[in-house]
Image (cartoon, rainbow, N blue to C red):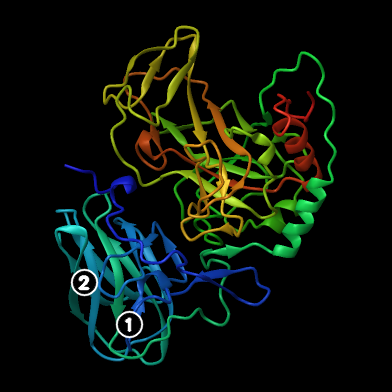
Amino acid sequence: MRNPGDPRKRSGGTRLVLAAAVAATLGASGVYVATADAAETVVPGRVQAESFAAQSGARTEGTADTDGGRNVGWLAGGDWLRFDRVTVGGAGLAARIASDNPAGGSIELRLGSRTGALLATFPVKRTGGWQKWTTVGATASSVPAGARTVFAVLKSAQRNDFVNINWFTFGGSPSPSPSPSPSPSAAAGWVKIDKARWATQLAEYQATAAEPVPAGNVRVPEFNASCKVSHRLPDDPIVFPGMAGASHLHTFMGNRSTSATSTNASLFANAGTSCDPKEDRSAYWIPTLLENGRPVDPHGVTVYYGSRLKDPTRTVPFPEGFRMIAGDAKRQVATPKGAPGQFWCAGAGGETGRSADGNWPVCAKTAEVTFQLTFPDCWDGEHLDSPDHRSHVGPTGPDGTCAGGRFPVAIPSVSFVIGYPTSGGAAGFQLASGLASSMHGDFMNAWETKPLAERVRNCITQKAKCDSFGNF
């Protein structure tokens, strides 16, 4: 039986369009929101699910439903979608859903907030597949006047994903556009790069001369940032921007100011960092590891920047404001020995056993629990971020290049190597996000452009191993 929470086994839909959920720029505010896919059928009173102004836990995908476009999936209990300026034109409401999870659940529509007045509830039962669509109805408890903010709150008794949503119908002619004065909590959509600014950054990089590599240098394309833990907060400025306390607990490294309200500008405005070199003001974070219910901070995290390309000379620096996520906080599956995505033991003696539940290593007293998290290293060249914070990047192709696909631009391969000062035991651990399989990491680039350009030119493109300060 397949695991409905595994996104690699959920792509049952046919991708009908490549450009979907295009971002709308709200003046000079820097806030972006998703808009509906132009390929979908326009029906009065219908709100496409991907036209959300903010979300938690949602990802979009091409849909095989009859009116095409995209649907929102990867939805589990506690996730939500926010829609602004919705007019409820009548008591008869509808939702277009698909599910391949027998547990089912419900979708609650609430007014104004996630805990606001209940407008209606749609029951969710298994439809026979993640792209087997059916329309379910509900009756509104009232018909509120005017344009309203509506939250779709997902409810289920179990943790796995349980429903896909294509659209809602509110019985009138709602406008799913963003409110004219969006709050900072509006979720980022397809955040387009400033092409003129990027062209300037690229020109500065191309003008950076490479320093000669000394004899005897290890010829590995690599530099790093050596980081300590800065602080812990239940915040996530990528997934929950502006929403303090909305996330599970994260352990932050790098920029000491990182919080739910962090932006590229705020990171550069705060010079304090727990990493070397100090020219790296980036924000890095991971879910907090818990042992016997207590946080265990890494004694250090080395952030490696390298290349997995056959030809690393193709690599360019990250653009200003770039961000991405690796791993999946919603992946909740067992990780027995030999499974992918393992925590492992570094040091003499290595692994000596497994926790009682089999999901965690038990290390020799001379070793410690370690994890390595690797991010994608190819970029679409167009977007600083995407609605799921993953769709603007992808892995190196099987030919060892980034060329020829959706992600033609080679960026440094980022990898977190995380060392915890514990050997573990029979009780194992827990992540703030759940099981070991939910390990994930976030990166908001705030490198000063010149030091980053010098390191990419000297270390990566010349296949030369450099230290945290960019020295050979």
Q: Residue at x 24, y 82 (%)?
A: 93
The quarter of the rendered structure image containing the C terminus is: top right
Q: Is residue 215 left or right of residue 79?
A: right
Q: Residue at x 70, y 54 (%)?
A: 320
Query: Separation of disc 2 and disc 1 at Cα?
Result: 16 Å
Q: Residue 165: x percent and y percent? A: 29, 67
Q: Secondary structure at mark 1?
A: strand
The mark total stands at 2
Between residues 39 and 100, which one lies in front from this camera angle?
A: 39
Q: Is residue 279 visible?
A: no
Query: How many other residues sit within 10 Å of disc 1, few (<14), some (14-19) or many (≥20)?
Result: many
Q: Which residue is mark 1?
A: 46
The correct choice, above or below, for 176 with respect to 271 in the image is: below
Q: Is residue 339 visible?
A: yes
Mark 1 is on which residue type?
Answer: Arg
Q: Which residue is mark 2?
A: 122
Q: Residue at x 14, y 58 (%)?
A: 128
Mark 2 is on which residue type?
Answer: Phe
The correct choice, above or below, for 328 with respect to 49 in the image is: above
Q: Residue 219: x percent and y percent? A: 69, 21
